Image (cartoon, rainbow, N blue to C red):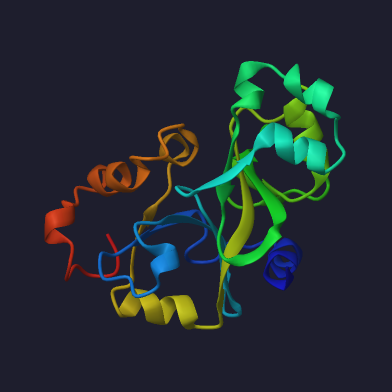
Amino acid sequence: MDLLRHKKAAAGRGFLDDQFLIAMPGMKDDRFARSVIYVCAHSDEGAMGLIINQTQQMLFPDLLVQLGIMNEQEAIRLPAHTRDFVVRNGGPVDRSRGFVLHSGDYRVESSLTVSDDICLTATVDILRAISTGRGPRHALMALGYSGWGAGQLETEIAENGWLTCPATQELLFDADIERKYDRILASIGIDLAHLSAAAGHA
């Protein structure tokens, strides 16, 4: 994706990098209803992020087999924590493409630094590393991504489509996906019942 390549070349941070976007109750696009998006890249050219609280039907071992990283017999023998690694729906764009958002203790040449301790890697190397226990301490895997053109996300925020707040590793990587939306709102002191006409930032 051009925005990610630009970010890697510029080696800078956009205003919304490393932030959560929290869908407001009046979100017009059903695909993003009650979604939380982690922003990986933001610049004058647009923005790119991953939905972190929507899951895919596909299981991680199935994905490894589909990509030819291992066969079905090997996938059955994966340790429980790897077998249960959740594959998420990162967004409506390019759903055949996988992204791993992870802690900075794992980096390869293709890894993109999002913040001081968060990276994004989109190559199969990291999937092999995770499957063999050599991956990052914290990681989440998503198929597809969410993208915005120049000025589009800023307009949506101004129109109260999204609330923003700084991301934390704990809320980004913990396994409680179902309650993530409510818990992130609670972490910034927002009661969903009072959110309908709230401003676009915390």
Image-based side of 65 in relation to 165, left or right? right
Image-based side of 36 in relation to 64, left or right? left
Image-based side of 167 in relation to 140, left or right? left
Residue at 40% x, 33% y is 176
What percent of the width, then of the height, locates residue 149?
57, 80
Q: Is residue 51 above or below residue 172?
A: below
| In the foreground, 179 or 65 | 65
Image-based side of 96 in relation to 21, left or right? right
Do we see residue 199 in this rendering?
yes
What percent of the width, then of the height, locates residue 158?
32, 79
Quadrant in the rendering for residue 3? bottom right
As drawn, the residue found furthest toward the left would be: 194
Q: Quadrant of the N terminus?
A: bottom right
Q: Is residue 25 above or below residue 150?
A: above
Residue at 72% x, 37% y is 62
Do we see residue 116 in this rendering?
no
Residue at 46% x, 75% y is 153
| In the foreground, 1 or 42 | 1
What percent of the width, then of the height, locates residue 198?
19, 67
What percent of the width, then of the height, locates residue 136?
67, 30
